[in-house]
Image (cartoon, rainbow, N blue to C red):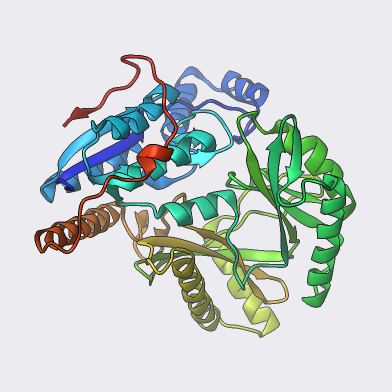
Amino acid sequence: MASKTFHVVYTTNWKCQPGENFNMSKAEWKKKLASLSSQKRKEFLRFENNEPNCCDLTQPYFREVLIKEARRQGFKVVRWPVRRREDFLRVGEAIRSGEMVPGAAAVLLHAWHGTYEKECVPAWDFYPVLDAVKAVNNLVYPHPDLDQLHSEKRYKSSLMPPTCYIHFVRQGDDWKVKGKTDRRVKDVIAEELQKLEAKACAKGLPFKDIMVKQGLSWGGYAVMRIAPTSAQEYITQKMLPKLPQPAQKVTVLLQAKLDVLSELRWVMVEGKLRGTEWKSLNEPKRGGVAQKAGYQDRHEARKMVEKFGKETGKFTMESLEKSMGEMCKHVYNEAVADANGEEPLYLRVDLLLDKQCRVWLGERESWGADLNCNDEIPKRMDPTMKEMSVRMVTKVKRLLNQKRGTRKLGLSKVKKHAFTKRMPKFKYAPGAGFAGGA
């Protein structure tokens, strides 16, 4: 029977490790540090080391806010700190052994194609353990299915720009296309490019350049603008060979390039529209990674959109944001369908406004989306981290109470979870991880 235990799985690895997944290469990082005075260097490192790679809700500050709220609502909190692989795999082993008692759980980590850096965990380790935690606990956040669809870039929407998906699987030392392993990868890519060109043409979009997006990445670090004729070489010779050997699958999106004016990021909490923020990556050069183009200033971006509306006479900010709000609700309903009817607590919908005044879905983010600022109250988020912690704990407490009530009425039976037979056996060094009541 589920107890009033609140498990928190989180990282203690708050030290920046610059590499190809970050803003700077290691050489650029060293050059940056060398250019700073001793005091400025300390301030710079303090900022970088406290910044998450991906999401606000993985920060040490939010973790403590969440733990405080769990205690306030009567939970016994058990911490599961993670610094390296052995610590994380031990969480899976603790479920197998019964050390992690059923209750509620928050897994404040992310999946990616990388190493154990800050809050980021390699996907091949992350999802088996997350699924095991979910099997015996009520997760406060995220919805695991939506999280995986988002992280791997496998979800679809009627509002997306023309897009083709290629699902790669590793066979020995080679990559093949799932379901088409008897065919050459280059031939499949060529076929998908033909489909994409037809889709782009049907929407009145040019096909001089396309965007290639790799799953299990974010922030534009693995989003490349290239000519269609370069796609085969880029994917087969530059993208796939760089993936770590343990990575057994990856989804790659081929997407029509839009002439983007800006992007509206709209937070939704339990299906309700909340904070908004105009902000977009600038347009990368051909052959360039999107992230290196830099971001628009959110205040200047809004002014630019408003000015564009006045000059073209095609929209006012009020009418534009009203219509985009309805589109967000449509995307939310698509997410609910992907979650088999379960409504996600939190969703951020990023909508792209192009220079033809058309709106497209840029991204639908569940776990991994930062909170937006509130323009009416400077430096305050909407929702705030405090509000999110209250909603997360309150929801999971209600679900646990419903479970206990159902069992008392004799309407369900406690069954051994099937996952215990399927879950891989985790190995860890004695003393490598620690879980203790707090």
Residue at the (17%, 64%) spot, across then down: 411
Height in image: 87 above or below 169? above
Q: Nearer the viewer, residue 216 or 61?
A: 216
Q: Nearer the viewer, residue 125 or 13?
A: 125
Residue 243: x %, y % from top left? 67, 33
Horizontally, residue 406 falls left or right of residue 57, namely left
In the current view of this chain or complex, which residue is farthest to the top?
430
Find residue 372 and report its image quarter. bottom left
Horizontally, residue 269 falls left or right of residue 114, namely left
Residue 351: x %, y % from top left? 57, 67
- Location of the C terminus by quadrant is top left
Residue 197: x %, y % from top left? 84, 66
Height in image: 34 above or below 78? above
Residue at the (70%, 49%) spot, across then down: 178
Residue 58, visible in the rendered structure: no
Residue 422, visible in the rendered structure: yes
Horizontally, residue 309 falls left or right of residue 389, namely right
